[in-house]
Image (cartoon, grey):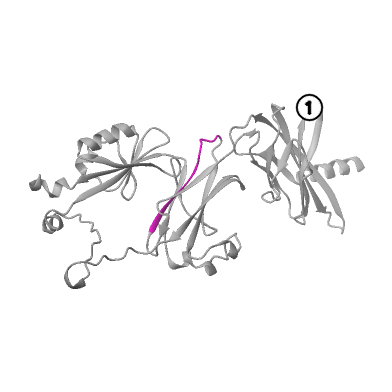
């Protein structure tokens, strides 16, 4: 009878103790010199309370703890010449760690979960479970570097800024990106392995007293500027960041001229209707402009208004945003197509992420055919 009771008790203990699923990682491998996020997946019953989660690494002849999380929130990462832990981003079920030495082609990563189980009779019984996962170790590539690009280096209230956050070089696995404006993360969209976002500038962007909710202290901001940042992350670990400052710019002043000091508004006008073009003063230059950007992969990006006649000659153009087209056609072929339609290059430069950029100009032929 006693043996039956003990056997039954052991079965109940096994079935109703903590359930440890194991170690998971998105990338599937560990890269030397690159932080990887690991997750210890487990479930515990309501009668159990967490005591600690301990991470360890095993390879031939060695087993060593590299991170421990206690139920009270305290953390301990013993110093190691083989593994480095980012304690700030590591929590109860997640650890962000980096392999420092590529001497082992494979290691076993283990997580051990300890709980205290309420027996129901006023006593707490300690329980523990551990699971290990074999993971390949791959020599790391170049460290992650990111760039932030903005359509404006000066901005005013009412302007719309286009922002791009991207890795300088292709990464495997690909990092996650985040764009922060004055310390606050903004929503963006991943396009061609880069994060793009658009910000409408308002007065609060230039007011440092409104920025204290960000992750930076208030005194780290400069009045009448906007701080824009690009963050590259693996899991919760920020592996690289880059920033730039957008200054507050004043509107261009009106030029004075004519008899009697009368003010003349020389601000350029955007005319996109045939009647407007027929009515404006003869001899006034009337041009349209577009920007062509090379892609990191084969292809090109066209920004600006493009007529249907031009679009018919560009292979498979895809509209990705207002006045923004992408095509897989080689950028040189795109420039030749635009040249055939009367565009000429009036400026060449490089974007913040080191892509070639061409500014092209042409007369509004559609509205001035009688003047040719």
- Residue 344, image quadrant: top left
In magenta stretch: residue 162: yes
Residue at x-position 45% and y-position 45%: 352
Looking at this rendering, what residue extends furthest in the left direction? 370
**Which one is nearer the viewer's eye here, 303 or 73?**
303
Residue at x-position 53% and y-position 67%: 208
**Which one is nearer the viewer's eye here, 46 or 354?**
354
**Which one is nearer the viewer's eye here, 151 or 109?**
151
Q: Residue 294, percent across and down?
A: 37, 37
In the displayed structure image, the side of residue 115 where residue 295 appears, left or right:
left
Q: Residue 3, percent across and down?
A: 90, 40
Q: Is residue 315 visible?
A: no
Q: Which span of residues is magenta-colored?
A: 160-172
Q: Is residue 182 visible?
A: yes
The crowding category of the residue bearing disc 1, from other C-alpha atoms within 10 Å (few below 14, some 14 to 19, many at least 20), is few
Q: Which residue is mark 1?
A: 60
In the displayed structure image, the side of residue 353 where residue 307 appears, left or right:
left
Looking at this rendering, what residue extends furthest in the right direction? 2
Figure label count: 1
Looking at this rendering, what residue extends furthest in the bottom direction? 260
Q: Main secondary structure of the magenta part?
A: strand
**Which one is nearer the viewer's eye here, 124 or 360?**
360
In the displayed structure image, the side of residue 185 where residue 162 appears, left or right:
left
Quadrant where the C terminus lies?
top left
- Residue 31, image quadrant: top right
Q: Residue 168, percent across and down?
A: 50, 39
Q: Secondary structure at mark 1?
A: loop
Q: From what the image shows, is residue 354 above or below residue 274?
A: above
């Amino acid at each position: 009878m006693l043996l039956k009771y003990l056997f039954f008790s052991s079965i109940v203990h096994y079935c109703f103790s903590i359930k440890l699923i194991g170690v998971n990682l998105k990338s599937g491998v560990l890269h030397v010199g690159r932080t990887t996020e690991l997750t210890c997946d487990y479930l515990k019953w309501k009668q159990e309370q967490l005591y600690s989660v301990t991470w360890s690494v095993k390879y031939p002849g060695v087993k060593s703890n590299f991170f421990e999380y206690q139920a009270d929130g305290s953390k301990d990462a013993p110093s190691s010449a083989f593994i480095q832990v980012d304690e700030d981003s590591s929590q109860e079920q997640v650890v962000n760690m980096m392999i420092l030495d590529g001497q082992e082609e494979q290691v076993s990563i283990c997580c051990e979960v300890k709980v205290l189980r309420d027996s129901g009779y006023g006593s707490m019984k300690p329980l523990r479970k551990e699971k290990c996962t074999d993971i390949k170790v791959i020599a790391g590539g170049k460290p992650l570097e990111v760039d932030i690009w903005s359509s404006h280096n000066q901005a005013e209230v009412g302007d719309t800024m286009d922002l791009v956050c991207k890795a300088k070089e292709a990464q495997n696995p690909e990092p996650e990106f985040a764009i922060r404006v004055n310390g606050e993360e903004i929503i963006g969209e991943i396009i061609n392995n880069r994060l793009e976002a658009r910000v409408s500038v308002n007065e609060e962007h230039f007011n440092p007293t409104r920025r204290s909710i960000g992750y930076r202290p208030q005194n780290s901001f400069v009045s009448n500027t906007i701080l824009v940042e690009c963050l590259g992350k693996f899991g919760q670990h920020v592996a690289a960041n880059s920033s730039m400052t957008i200054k507050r710019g004043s509107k261009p002043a009106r030029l004075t001229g004519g008899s009697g000091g009368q003010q003349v508004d020389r601000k350029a006008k955007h005319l996109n209707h045939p009647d407007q073009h027929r009515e404006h003063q003869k001899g006034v230059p009337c041009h349209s402009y577009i920007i062509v950007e090379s892609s990191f992969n084969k292809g090109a990006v066209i920004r600006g208004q493009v007529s249907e006649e031009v679009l018919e000659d560009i292979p498979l153009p895809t509209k990705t945003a207002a006045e923004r087209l992408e095509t897989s056609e080689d950028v040189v072929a795109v420039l030749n197509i635009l040249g055939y339609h009367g565009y000429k290059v009036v400026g060449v430069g490089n974007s913040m992420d080191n892509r070639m950029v061409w500014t092209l100009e042409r007369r509004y032929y559609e509205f001035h055919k009688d003047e040719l």
